[in-house]
Amino acid sequence: MYILNIIIFSFAFFISIVICAQSQELDRSLFKRSSMVSLEIAKKEIKQVYLDSGQTKTLHCGCFFDKQKQVYPNSCDITPSKHPINGKKIILKWVHVMPLFAFAGSMNCWNHLICTKSDGSMFKGANCCGSISPKFKSMESDMHNLIPSFDWTTGTEKSPIEPVPFGGMGEYKVCTNGGVIPNNPTGKARGNLARAYFYMSFLYRIQIQNTLEENLRAWHFEDPPDKTEEIRNSLIEQVQGNRNPFIDHPEIVERVRDF
């Protein structure tokens, strides 16, 4: 009888653990779909989001930009390296935190020549996906994945051979010594980047490479959401009808075992 009670207790304990684990899984109903389907419109709207919030600075280096989208590299939170400007204006660009290749790299339209031009030639990549895939258009135009940045070009730098894991990494040519693009972003940007990545991964079912995921989880808790990020989240919701729950509830990251 004693042994039987032990077996029954052990089985009940095991079942309770399973139920508890299942109850902790993240509820997908927290994540609403974006209503935005145009990247061009998204860029106009995200610009207004930043103007309305009064936080007109790039994410990586904190360089001020005005409503004409002109960036001032001599007015950054991080002291910029000295590069010749050659009299050129530096214009703001909106880039994807999770780059195109990361969220579209497994799609047929990205990898295979399945689209046809008017002259009969075949093509693939972003233009192809944008013309035939509603999912791609939704991912591409999702404002939660767009950040303000810019490229610092002097005519002497070479583009990186390997694709970088985050959009706007070229901005580091300003705020790092020697104009070298590092592998990891600055501490002030890491949490923002992590939460955008988690949002894209969970909402659109995009797998994140294990090493990158480990880094993102650490960055998420080392650099928690601040007031600026919360305001941005609410302003984006007013435009495309959804929020990034990882900003509202940072703790729910723990409920996702594998992004």
Image (cartoon, rainbow, N blue to C red):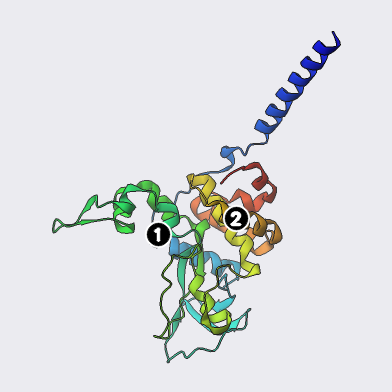
Q: Nearer the viewer, mark 2 or mark 1?
A: 2
Of all residues, the one furthest to the right in this rendering is 2
Q: Which residue has dot 2 on it? A: 195
Residue count near mark 2 (Cα–Cα under 10 Å), binned few <14, some 14–19, many ≥20: many
| C-alpha span from label 2 to label 1 | 20 Å
For residue 174, what is the image quadrant?
Answer: bottom right
Please say if the residues under marks 2 and 1 sit with CB atoms less than 8 Å apart. Answer: no
Residue plotted at (77% across, 21% down):
10
Q: Is residue 140 visible?
A: yes
- Residue drawn at 60 percent across, 70 percent down: 55
Q: Is residue 245 above or below residue 225?
A: above
Q: Residue at x 33, y 53 (%)?
A: 110
* Disc on the earlier residue, 2 or 1: 1
Query: Farthest residue in the left direction?
Result: 119
Q: Residue furthest front?
A: 3
On the image, the x and y values in percent for residue 230 come to 64, 58
Pinpoint residue 240: horizontal percent, then vertical percent: 49, 52
Front residue (pair 236, 14): 14
Under circle 2, the secondary element is helix
Q: Which residue is mark 1?
A: 39
Q: Is residue 9 placed above or below 216 in the rendered structure?
A: above
Q: Amino acid at mark 2?
A: Arg
Report the front residue among 125 and 233: 125
**x%, y% of residue 148?**
51, 69
**Residue 51: quarter of image:** bottom right
Q: Is residue 142 above or below residue 90?
A: above
